[in-house]
Amino acid sequence: VITVDLLSRPGGGAAGWALQIQQRCDLSKGKMRDAIRAFATGLTNTWIGLTPVETTWMKGHYYAVLDSSIPPEEPRPQDKREARAGGGGDKSRARLAPVIAQFDLGHTITFWNSAPYAVSVEYGTASMSPRAWTRKTVALAPSLLAQAVSGRPVTAAAD
Amino acid sequence: VAQPDLEIIGLLQARLAAMSPAPAGGIAWENRAFTPLTTAPWVRVSHAFVDAEPMTWLSNGTPQIRETGLLLLDCFAPENAGPEVGAGWPRRCGSGSTPGLVLAGATVSVRIDRATRAQGRVGAGTPDDPVGYFSPVTVSWRTYYDAG
């Protein structure tokens, strides 16, 4: 809108100013795009890395979707061997990466874990302490975002 | 300088212990023997230290560590005792953890950032997930101390 408005107006100064702003905005947009993708990658790597290690199946069942809050149906394990196989963090990271690569400004990305017992592990039960790995990840988000925006490599918790 | 984790835990727990009246079923402190009741409300306390990062700014000429963490309060209530019983202790824990509240200790001050209450859950009635209703309350805090 600013560009159209100023292009129709005589006066190089104003046009130059508009161009400068536009260039700055374009540059900022590109950097912002890189930053939000780096942030999303760092956040999910941390989430996966903090997953309680004894739950390999849970570690391998992270998903992401763009512009939808309703997770699509996930194929259930066909047998116990497949269920035990899990796949670990690498399987989840490989599944999330292409979705994060499409994540852009103005869009929403939703991450979730499909393990039916994930909520019980997160919050605990009357006989089991909470592991709170999701809440720890959320608590680390400001630090991860600061790293991403500054252009520094986003370091995640060890897997 | 040793990480002042015990002092931080002490400040947070003292705040909780000062709430009156105490939950009828007691408070399950971390790493203390406790027998939960199914007939009275009780609260389970867990501590999660999230991050400790060096700060580049200096407040008194000494490098500082900024430490953040979570106080996890799981408020249990008897099953079918009604929403008032179920919401009572989560509400108290939340209102007793006002954002901005500063808990001053001898060497550190802990600042409460926020308190959030998750949706209540009902136990499945299995050995791993006994019957009962509970609401998790998460209290975020931060503190600064000399890096030494």
Image (cartoon, rainbow, N blue to C red):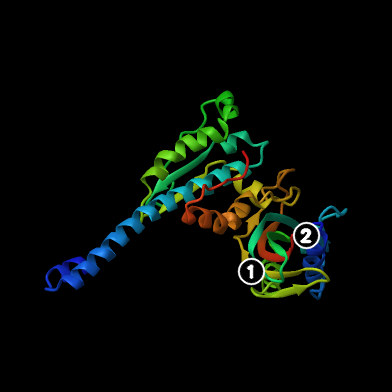
Q: CA distance from mark 2 to mark 1?
A: 25 Å
Left or right, A152 with respect to B137, comes to left
Mark positioned earlier in the residue sequence (2 or 1):
1
* Residue A1 visible in the snapshot: no
Q: Is residue A43 above or below residue B11?
A: above
- Identify the secondary structure beneath mark 1: strand
Q: Are marks 2 and 1 on the same chain?
A: yes
**Label 2 neighbour load within 10 Å: few <14, some 14-19, many 20+:** few
Q: Residue furthest top?
A: A81
Front residue of this view, candidates B38 and B87: B87
**Label 1 neighbour load within 10 Å: few <14, some 14-19, many 20+:** some
Disc number for residue A57: none
The image quadrant that residue A101 belongs to is top left
Label 2 sits on what residue type? Gly
Residue under label 1 = B113
Whole-percent x, y for residue A118 in the image: 60, 45
Quarter in which the N terminus of chain A is drawn:
bottom left
Q: Are marks 2 and 1 in contact (CB under 8 Å)?
A: no
Whole-percent x, y for residue B97 in the image: 69, 72
Whole-percent x, y for residue B101 in the image: 69, 75
Q: Is residue A127 above or below residue B95?
A: above
Label 2 resides on the chain identified as B
Label 1 resides on the chain identified as B
Whole-percent x, y for residue B137 in the image: 66, 63
Q: Residue at x 68, y 65 (%)?
A: B141
- Identify the secondary structure beneath mark 2: loop
Q: Residue at x 65, y 64 (%)?
A: B140
**Which is in the foreground here, disc 2 or disc 1?**
2
* Residue B14 visible in the snapshot: yes
Q: Residue at x 20, y 66 (%)?
A: A3
Residue under label 2 = B148
Q: Residue furthest right?
A: B33
